[in-house]
Amino acid sequence: MLRVDGRDLSGWTSVQIIRALDQLADTFDLAISTSRASSAEIVEGAACEVIYRGEKLISGYIDDVDLSDTSTSSSLSVSGRSRAGDLVDCSAIHKPWRKRSGLEIARDICKPFGISVDLEIATGTLGEEGYFKIEDGETVFDVLDRLARLNGARLCSYPDGSIRFTRTGLLHYPDVLIARGINIASAHVRRSMAQRFSDYVFKAQLAADDETFGEAVAIKYEVRDDAVPRHRPLVVQTETQPRNTKGQFVEGEPIKHPLQLAATWERNTRAGKSLQMEYVLVDRKNPKRSWEHARGVGTQHRRRCRGRRIRHRRRVPRHAGHHDARLGGRDAYAGHPDAAGGVRREGAAQAEEAQGGGFSF
């Protein structure tokens, strides 16, 4: 159901909803015959909500309205995004910050759009930035993504329109199962080494002051990926980095270097994307509701669930998949902690290696 200006429009003949860990704004695409709904009831730019069986999936805006008419039929399609779509499109405007946390910076640039920003439980903190400025041409999302990478975090939209910094696999759904013979109709695995590197060298230039100058303010941090067998270095020059990393952790340990989170995140993400698992899932008892699971439709991606009897020639370590909830498509990925991913239950899915194993939604 599409709710626009308090009016509920139902009877849609085609519905596609995409939620992914590697995109901030959730998207929707609905279609209907014009005999059931008038295009005059739906105005581009209008605020709307997508609701399924009383569960809110998306709070956002209508981007496009398409009306098709032939000699024999007419149809109407409506597409849009969650409220975070404005953050993806629009330029970031704000004066530079000094000694502000990443969360404070994020809230400052999102405030004009009426979008709240928070931290997911157990994400930890976003480091304090000694000096942080918006680069020319950056969108709001570009700035948020830069903050997320520096802190080894991810961004995602919530059904109420808010956004949060999070990490994948924080919560576990033990009652959600993906298994051969139960709900896997088909599966495909793809492995790649093309975008992985043996050494990740992160460099940054701290602002000089009365006590530090020259080489003292040039810092770097290096992390290895032992799974890459040959010499393949990657050097990344960052513009900013946290000055104060108190309260931040990486792989369960307090971080010891301001670039450690960013370097570890880059390695883990690339490792995760290198192993992709695609699934077509089907509810054999009720095929029309194959994209639902025990926790509903609107439950967020990043959640871990159980998986078993996943076989291919190379052994997969304990892993997790992450729910994209693309209603009408289907695939999944597997890999490493904090890799971009999600499970497409009649939609897109990705998986990542995570503590405790299983697949994450």
Image: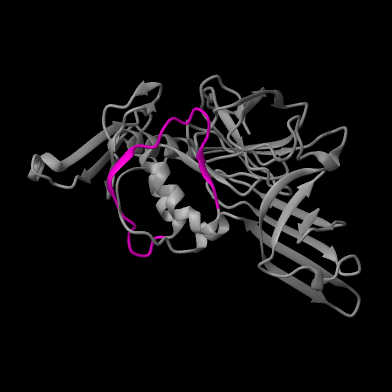
| Residue for point 81% across, 34% down | 283
Q: Nearer the viewer, residue 66 or 40?
A: 40
Magenta-colored span: 115-138
Q: Is residue 33 magenta?
A: no
State whether residue 38 is above or below residue 269.
below
Depicted 227 relative to depicted 240: above or below: above
Q: Position of residue 269 (x, y in %)?
A: 44, 38
Is any atom of residue 194 visible in this view? no
Q: Looking at the rendering, which quadrant does residue 31 occupy?
A: bottom right
Residue 255 x/y as whole percent: 31, 27
- The quarter of the rendered structure image containing the C terminus is top right
- Horizontally, residue 115 falls left or right of residue 3, namely left
Q: Which quadrant of the figure has residue 10?
A: bottom right
Location of residue 71 in the rendering, given as x and y in whole percent from the top left corner? 89, 80
Principal SS element in the magenta part?
loop
Can residue 276 be seen here? The reply is yes
Q: Position of residue 241 (x, y in %)?
A: 29, 42
Residue at image point 30% right, 43% down: 129
Q: Quick one: 193 or 97, which is closer to the camera?
A: 97
